[in-house]
Image (cartoon, rainbow, N blue to C red):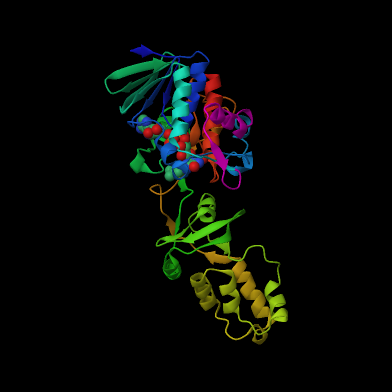
Amino acid sequence: MADYDAIVLGAGAAGLMCAGVAGQRGKRVLVIDHADRPGKKILISGGGRCNFTNTGTVPDRFISANPHFARSALARYTPADFTELVEAYGIAWHEKTLGQLFCDGSARQIVDLLMAEGAKGGVEVALGEPITAVDHADGRYRVTFGDRTASAPALVIATGGPSIPKMGATGFAYDLARRFGLRVVEPRPALVPLTLGGDEVLFRELSGVATEVVAIAGKAAFREAALFTHHGLSGPAILQVSSYWRHGQPIAIDFLPGRTPGWLKQLKRDTPRTTVARTLTAALPERLAAVLGERLALSGTLADLTDARLAAAEARLSHWAFHPNGTQGFAKAEVTVGGISTAELSSKTMEGRRVPGLYAIGEAVDVTGWLGGYNFQWAWASGFAAGEAI
Ligand code: FDA
């Protein structure tokens, strides 16, 4: 049996970050992953260019049963810290939009950076072996993988969440956490397309149509593009609200964001001979304008319509209710909302409050970021916090 100071389960974003930090502090670290390559999700992230952080990172861009939990780790390892590391490796980057930083080249550069940081700290990485047993006795964790067993006083759960199972994602983190008595907040697919059924199935005919909207679920609202698909709704605005959406709830879409209330009444005064259909066609993609116009069923010129009817149309256009019948599930979800309960962990070190030596980081934990580089920032920050502590 080989002895280490820490064993990290999962060679993804959080696990590799944690291992590199601990290794460079002089700790003997082993990382184990059942995949044959490290950082597979990093490789496909950001369309292959990895949206590695977001300069607008603040705690309220993360969803968790305890919204304050992420605060400490995020403050101690910031987007500027990771960007500095990226620059130290000569990786060129650019800001795309809304503070989202991407590699100019390839996401592989980020995986190479993490592996190089690990190598600097003498981190050992064991790939392609399933983990067959994890035990805890006499203050040490013992992990069996393939035909080897390793032991350490610290064990870090960094196996992520179950989104995109065909890439090897599993619910392993939750099973392991439960075995050690840690609670798990019910995991749900997030940053995921929503599906439409019933009457709203007709909107699927708009498949391929995209437009800028404000999408609203409860108190959360995002102004970005929405996209109609064969299954229902997608695009950044919809992915963002999906993280807040619960089965049975409606979502609302403002199809004409930024208009001053009363604009349709004003338009009637300014151009009384125009029609609602023409107004929609001028502002929206043609096919969408046609479907919305049909459903509003307001024929004739604006002058023919009462102010009350125009006010009702305006209200509907700015708060068009959709009733998703589900999501496209973990198969299509970028991340998972829920996970190992933050109530079980120290927000400073990510160590189990009741289980000394057991740490959980990254997506496995009940902290989920918005779309746009926030999830990697959480992986870096939580990985750094644990790497400093073990
Ligand atoms: P991560 O999933 O990275 O790593 C977990 C590791 O554990 C994997 O290597 C896996 O093989 C391993 N593992 C799982 N089960 C195991 C088991 N039973 N035994 C052994 N090993 C096991 N975020 C962002 O900020 N910017 C972006 O651009 C994107 N883009 C993006 C695109 C797509 C398509 C997806 C699916 C996701 C994103 N994300 C993203 C989200 C981001 O990828 C995610 O939040 C982080 O990778 C989470 O890092 P972790 O290290 O926690 O898990």
Compared with 66, 276 (above or below) is below
> How many numbered discs sit on the rendered protein?
0
Give the residue at x 57% y 60%: 212
Viewer-closest of 177 and 27:
27
Residue 40 horizontal/vertical position (percent): 39, 36
In the rendered view of the protein, which quadrant contains the N terminus?
top left
Q: Is residue 178 left or right of residue 53?
A: left
Viewer-closest of 244 and 98:
98
Residue that protrudes farthest toward the left in the picture: 147
Residue 356 horizontal/vertical position (percent): 50, 20
Residue 47 highlighted magenta (yes or no):
no
Give the residue at x 47% y 28%: 113
Q: What is the quadrant of residue 116 in the picture?
A: top left
Residue 80 highlighted magenta (yes or no):
yes
From where the camera sits, is residue 210 visible? yes
From where the camera sits, is residue 160 visible? no
Q: Which residues are magenta?
A: 75-99
Compared with 203, 82 (above or below) is above
Q: What is the quadrant of residue 4 in the picture?
A: top left
Residue 184 horizontal/vertical position (percent): 47, 37
Q: Is residue 309 left or right of residue 88?
A: right
Q: Is residue 365 left or right of residue 125?
A: right
Residue 169 horizontal/vertical position (percent): 38, 38
Q: Quadrant of ligand 1?
A: top left
Compared with 184, 273 (above or below) is below
Give the residue at x 53% y 61%: 250
